[in-house]
């Protein structure tokens, strides 16, 4: 499917937030998917994922959540710098900005405003899950990839808001991910089951953090392909 991609600017309380928007050529309106970046900025990987999603028939939008820091692209090997940026995130501000993205999509003539999903990677996985809880009426499906801290034992863990979920949730994790303890993954799975949510938590044996990203040493082609197919199947079921 042919697509068109361009940068757009969304007005937030803190200024203009760039966003990478990809959409199918012609037709529409289409369902939409928000793509939340990793801790390394709005880089070529996240843009590439957005383009792949658009080719599946969705309007994909990837907001640059680092805009307030000057929109840096952090190399994958510079983890301390990436962590320094995400430690300055504030959940209330992030949720306001995700609300801006949602309203932007709802106002687009090429988008079906009642069919919006979200996915995210790394810190973006956490943000995707939190958005599904905080903007429950707007999100029809959430697909977080290795979202660190979703089920952490802290007051601000998104899992504490899981009772608010109104959408299907598909979560992916790597078995050997050193940043996300498996007890947190089990806690997430058990909580979603206890709440009787439409959800699945998938753990890929032998895969580590960032297994979906073909620009990282931790890339696992088999796990990435399986996760992509599963995500597309769930998007098709709940958004089309």
Image (tube, grey):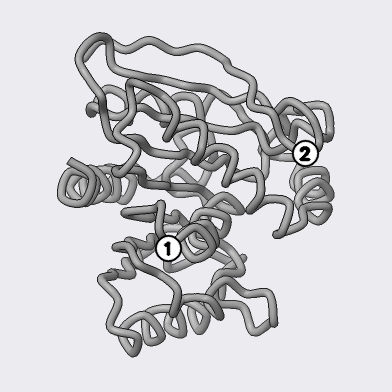
Percent coordinates x, y for residue 52 in the rendering: 33, 27
Q: Quadrant of residue 167?
A: bottom left
Percent coordinates x, y for residue 13 in the rendering: 77, 38
**Residue drawn at point x = 84 percent, y = 34 percent:** 69
172 and 214: which is toward the camera:
172
What distance separates the C-alpha of mark 2 from that of mark 1?
A: 33 Å
Please give left or right for residue 114 compared with residue 69 in the image.
Answer: left
**Residue drawn at point x = 42 percent, y = 28 percent:** 50
Residue projecting furthest to the bottom: 194
In the depicted structure, whether residue 40 falls above or below residue 51: below
Task: Classify mark 2: residues with Cα within 10 Å, few (<14), some (14-19) or many (20+).
Answer: few
Contact between marks 2 and 1 (CB within 8 A): the answer is no
Of badges 2 and 1, nearer the viewer stands 2
Mark on residue 106? Answer: none
153 and 177: which is toward the camera:
153
Pointer 2 residue: 13
191 and 176: which is toward the camera:
191
Please give left or right for residue 71 compared with residue 102 in the image.
Answer: right
Percent coordinates x, y for residue 7 in the rendering: 57, 15
In the depicted structure, whether residue 75 falls above or below residue 224: above
Q: Secondary structure at mark 2?
A: loop
122 and 131: which is toward the camera:
131
Pointer 1 residue: 173
Mark 2 vs 1, N-terminal side: 2
Please give left or right for residue 121 compared with residue 143 in the image.
Answer: right
In the depicted structure, whether residue 60 falls above or below residue 233: above
Task: Classify mark 1: residues with Cα within 10 Å, few (<14), some (14-19) or many (20+).
Answer: many
Q: Quadrant of residue 143?
A: bottom left
**Residue drawn at point x = 37 percent, y = 86 percent:** 190
Q: Secondary structure at mark 1?
A: strand
């Amino acid at each position: 499917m042919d697509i068109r991609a361009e940068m757009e600017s969304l007005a937030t309380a803190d200024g203009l937030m760039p966003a990478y928007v990809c959409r199918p050529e012609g037709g529409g309106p289409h369902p939409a998917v928000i793509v939340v970046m990793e801790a390394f900025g709005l880089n070529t990987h996240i843009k590439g994922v957005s383009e792949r999603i658009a080719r599946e028939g969705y309007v994909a939008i990837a907001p640059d959540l680092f805009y307030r820091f000057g929109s840096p692209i952090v190399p994958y090997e510079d983890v301390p710098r990436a962590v320094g940026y995400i430690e300055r995130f504030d959940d209330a501000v992030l949720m306001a900005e995700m609300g801006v993205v949602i309203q932007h999509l709802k106002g687009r003539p090429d988008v079906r405003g009642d069919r919006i999903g979200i996915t995210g990677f790394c810190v973006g996985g956490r943000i995707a899950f939190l958005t599904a809880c905080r903007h429950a009426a707007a999100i029809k499906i959430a697909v977080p990839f290795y979202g660190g801290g979703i089920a952490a034992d802290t007051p601000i863990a998104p899992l504490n808001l899981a009772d608010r979920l109104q959408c299907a949730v598909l979560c992916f994790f790597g078995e050997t991910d050193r940043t996300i303890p498996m007890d947190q993954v089990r806690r997430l799975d058990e909580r979603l089951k206890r709440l009787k949510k439409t959800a699945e938590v998938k753990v890929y044996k032998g895969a580590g953090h960032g297994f979906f990203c073909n620009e990282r040493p931790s890339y696992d082609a088999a796990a990435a392909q399986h996760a992509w197919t599963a995500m597309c199947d769930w998007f098709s079921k709940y958004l089309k």
